[in-house]
Amino acid sequence: MRHTSLIMACLACLALPATALAQTVTPVALSPDPSVTRTGQLVYRGGVSIDMDHEGFGGLSALELSEDGSRMLAISDSAWWVKAEIVWTETNELATVRNIRIDAMLDPDGEPLEGRMADSEGLTRGYGPDYLVSFEREHRIWAYPIGEDWAATGSALPRPFSTPATARYLGNNRGLESLARLPDRSIIAGVEYPSTFLPNHTIWRLPLAGEWEDNQLTPTPTFGLTGLAEHDGQVYALERFWARGVGNRIRIRRFAAAELSAWPVQAETIGALDPPMTVDNFEGISVIERNGETLVLILSDDNFSDNQRTLLLAFAVEE
C-alpha cells in the first residue's frame, strides 16, 4: 500500500504544470545619456536585462509575441523553449518580465535535442497549431504543434517541414537564422550572411502552394541578418555587426513584403544601436500593434557569456 501511494504521489508530481523560475529583471536605459530617447524613427519604450540560473536560459535567438504583447515566446540556440509574461505600463512602456517558464525542445522520439541537432535559430507561427523552428549545423525546418497558447512546448513532437534544397550547402554557423510568415501565409527564411558569390542577403520564400523561391535583400555592408518579423504588410529585418575590439552594432530595417523578388530589395533603416547606447548581440525581433502604436521588440543572445546580457528592448515606430 505504501509503495502504491508513493507511486501515485510521484505520478501526481509529474502531472503538475511547470512552475515559474526565480529571475532577476533590471530596467535598462537606451543610453547613459538620459536625453537620448530615440534612434531614427524608433522611440524608446523601455527595456530590461533578464538573468536567471537555469541551463536553458541564455543564447536566446528568436522571439514571438502574443497579439496583445502580454506574452513572449523565445527559443535558445541550444534547443530550449522560453516563455514569459510581459508587463506594460498604462503609457505603453515595457515595465518588466515575469513568470518565466522553460521547456526542453524535443526530437521526434520525445527526447531533448542535443549536439549538432540542437542549434535552433529561427521561429515563426506556422499553420494551425504549428510553430516553425529553423536550425543551423544540421540545416532544417521543423514544425512543432505547440498551440496558439504555446501550452504544449514541453510535449510537442516535431514533424519535418519543407526546407530550401540549397540550405544543405550553408556553413555550420551561417544557416537559416530567421523565419517569418507573410500576410499571404507564405513563409520566409533568412540566411545570416551573404555567400561568397552573392553580395546580398538571401531570403527564401515558400508560397502556400509552391516551392521555395530565391529572393535578395541588399545588406548594410558587413552586417549579418539575424531576425525577421512581419507586421501590417511590412517586413522588419534585424541586422548585427560584431568585431573583436569593436563590439556589436545593430540596424533595424524595413521593406514592403510585396517587394520581395529575385532582384535585391532596398530596405530603409529605421533605427540603429551603436555604443555607447545599450547594445548587445540582438537576434530576436517581433512587431505588434498595442494601444494605437506599432511596437518593435528586440531580444539579445548572450552567448551564455558572463560578459553579455539577455536584453529585451521595446520601441514605438514613429512615421
Image: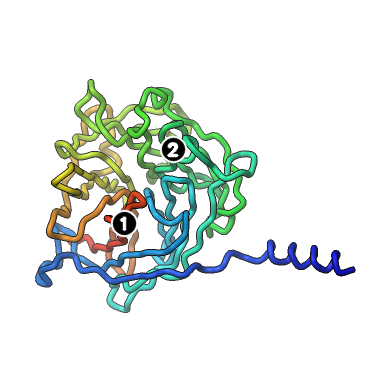
Frontmost residue, 168 versus 285: 168
Q: Quadrant of the C terminus?
A: bottom left
Residue 216 relative to residue 86: left or right = left
Residue placed most toward the observer, 203 or 208: 203
Q: Secondary structure at mark 1?
A: loop
Q: Amino acid at mark 2?
A: Phe
Left or right of residue 114: residue 175: left
**Could you say which quadrant of the image residue 32 lies in?**
bottom left
- Residue at image mark 1: 306
Q: Could you tell me if residue 319 is visible in this image? A: no
> What distance separates the C-alpha of mark 2 from that of mark 1?
25 Å
Mark 1 belongs to which amino acid? Asp
Q: Kindly identify the residue that appears in the image at 27 percent across and 50 percent down.
A: 281
Residue 311 falls in image quadrant = bottom left
Label 2 neighbourhood size at 10 Å, few (<14), some (14-19), many (20+)?
many
Residue at 35% in and 34% down: 173
Q: Looking at the picture, how far across and down is residue 232, in whole percent?
A: 32, 52
* Location of the N terminus (image quadrant): bottom right
Q: Secondary structure at mark 2?
A: strand
Question: Quick one: label 1, few (<14), some, or many (20+) residues within 10 Å?
Answer: few
Question: Disc 2 marks which residue?
Answer: 135
Q: Position of residue 95 (x, y in %)?
A: 32, 73
Give the left or right position of residue 319, taking residue 60 as reference.
left
* 242 or 199: nearer the viewer: 242
> Could you tell me if residue 267 is visible in this image?
yes
In percent of width and height, residue 15 lies at 69, 63
- Tag shown at residue 117: none
